[in-house]
Amino acid sequence: MDSGNGSDSSGGSRKGRNSRRTSDDGSQYSVSRPYSGYRDDVSVGAGSVSNAPVWSNHSRTQEAADTFLDEDQFSFTPVAPDPSANTIVGTFRPSLEDMVDVNVSRHGMTHGMSFNDKRNQPDHKVRRSSIFSMGGFDDTPFETVGMTNRKLFTWCCLLIVVVIVIVLAVTLPPASSDPSSSSDSSENGNSNSAAPYMPSVPTHSSDHAEYLDPTVSEGDCDFTNILQPDIFLQCRCHGHISVFSESSLVNYNRLKKDFLGKDILPRYHSKLDSCEPPNRALVWLASDNYPVEGDMRDRYMLALLFAAWKGAGWTNQEKWLLSSQSHCDWYGVECNGANRTVDLLLNDNNLVGEIPTEIVKLDSLVTLEIADNHLDGRIPRKFGEWTSIQRLELSGNSLIFSIPTELGIMENLQSLELDHNKLKGTIPTEIMRLPKLGYVGLFANSLTGTIPTEVGLLKNCREFKVYSNSLTGSIPTHVGEMEELKVWESGRNTCEGTIPLQFGNIGTLKTLDLSSMGLTGSIPAHFGNLATLETLNLADNYIDGKIPTPLGDMTMMASLYLNHNALSGSIPSQLAQLRELTKLKLQENNLTGAIPKELASCDKLESVNMSGNKFSGNVPDEVCSLRSSELKSMISDCRDDTHVICSVPDCCTECAP
């Protein structure tokens, strides 16, 4: 084939390249097309292709290929037949319907083109490849390049197919050829009407003895001829699920796709034999025969909690996971008319483990009581999504880290009980903005920082307990804005400052505990307005001054703790008006004078301690007469004549050392 020399047939300079072709009648013609940047160094058969484009950069690859196939750029000039040509390397029909087979392969920086044709056939079909690479041309013969590409592509496809087959064989369980013919497992999984599917080695093998739960015996872990052994027992025995009935597998795959994957846990991924709580619960649900009424999610979520909290060791697990029982009959579960779980009451039931975030999927739950167990880990931030919950009781566990600020968006929360844990960090101000919050129990933790000034926003809060932490700062004066407050307990913290006068404005207050806070100043006389106050504990502070006489107006007072301060003066006789008083603690102050006989009017007194003061005279007989009724303990300084005279045991029960 003649590649041309850069001039057209008329002798002028040309704008394209020509290559000879053979038409149907045996005559040859040239293909001419405009171009820039072509090389004449690709040979095919006995001819030569002069139209090989050079793509100098990656971005022009597709553009060059499209340009090469553009019909408008081809022209055909008949030429004389070449009898010496013994190989037909290309016939071409100048039509857009034609398809050009362009093999662009990467051999170093190599690309090639070929035109394949059969001589003297009416339909000249030329195929176009869809494979393009980046680069230019080199001198590699075109047929070699094309063959290399085809082999490489074929081997790559085969390799991909093999990998896919292996992955599917490992991850997918074998489907039953007739799932309906498989017998369902019995309640206890002891049916042997069909051979169980066992994706791994038999679980009663001694090779897995190290997985045995010490509470189960070797005999309990022999699942031979059991169609569907208990899922939770398999995990306790060997740490994985290895025996399934075929019907359970069918249900498992259906539930994983249509139930779990759509709404409950859309991002869930786990192996079939996994003993992770979500998978263990799903395998159990797949083998469960109970006709679920209402939402299936509750039955699944409760099974997940049973797995997460080691239900086999619960103190009371009555009816849990029995296929014959509705989940509404399980111990501690209470449902509404639609069989949705509204209360989960598992206090003091030996729950062990962390709180799974999936628990928020119990989206009808109103009350969660899991106090006094052995739960650890953090409080899930997902709790912020739990809009249905009203009472959250997690006290008496070993929960750690900080209180999530997300709890501040639990808009229906009315009671928050997190006491007696190991929580750290500050009290989130977000909690103070919960409009319905009526109980805050954060005491007996390791919380730091101050009591938020936003506490005044808790208009409906009746009890606020933060004692026994490591809080600092002063008590916010905004406490006076808590209109429904009945109990305030912030004692045993390292605070400072004085007692806020605003406490005297809370007419509903029944208990005020400010003990061991490092408070200074005096007792506000304004406290006399607290007619409903039953307990006032100001012990172990640095309070000085006298005991205000208006305290006698707190007629509902039952316990008065003023001990271990710097109080001076005498005991006001007005305290005799406290007819409900049962405990009076005045020890370790600087009180002087005589003990008023009017205290005999407090005929409900059970315990009195006046030691560590500077009282004088005798304990009045009227007061001593209380020993014959309710008074069981009365301690004073009565060791010698320099102290109060009080006979033991007729009057005082003990003389302080």
Image (tube, rainbow, N blue to C red):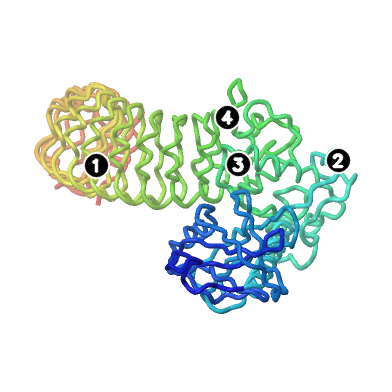
Determine the CA span between mark 1 and mark 3.
43 Å
In three-dimensional space, the C-alpha distance between marks 4 and 1, rounded to whole angstroms, equals: 36 Å
Of badges 2 and 1, the one in the foreground is: 2
Which residue is disc 3 drawn over? 261
- Position of residue 382 in the picture relative to residue 248 (left or right): left
Residue 594 in sight here = yes
Name the residue that disc number 1 marks: 451
Q: Distance between the residues labelled 4 and 3?
A: 21 Å
Query: Is 250 positioned to the left or the right of 126 in the image?
Result: right
What secondary structure is found at the residue carrying circle 3? helix
Q: Nearer the viewer, residue 322 or 15?
A: 15
Sequence-earlier tag: 4 or 3: 3
Residue, disc 4: 341
Chain-order first, disc 2 or disc 1: 2
Viewer-nearest of discs 1 and 3: 3
- Mark 3 is surrounded, within 10 Å at the Cα level, by few (under 14), some (14 to 19) or many (20 or more) other residues, namely some
Give the SS element for disc 2: loop
Mark 4 vs 1, N-terminal side: 4
Amino acid type, callout 4: Thr
- In the image, taking residue 100 as reference, residue 401 lies left or right, namely left
Q: Position of residue 9 (x, y in %)?
A: 51, 66
Looking at marks 4 and 2 on the same chain, the residue that comes earlier in the sequence is marked by 2
Give the residue at mark 2: 183
User: What's the residue type where badge 3 is placed?
Assistant: Gly
Position of residue 485 measured from the top left corner of the image (x, y, whole percent): 28, 27
Residue 631 vertical position relative to residue 240 in the rendered view, above or below:
above
**Mark 4–mark 3 CB contact (< 8 Å):** no
Q: Quadrant of the N terminus?
A: bottom right
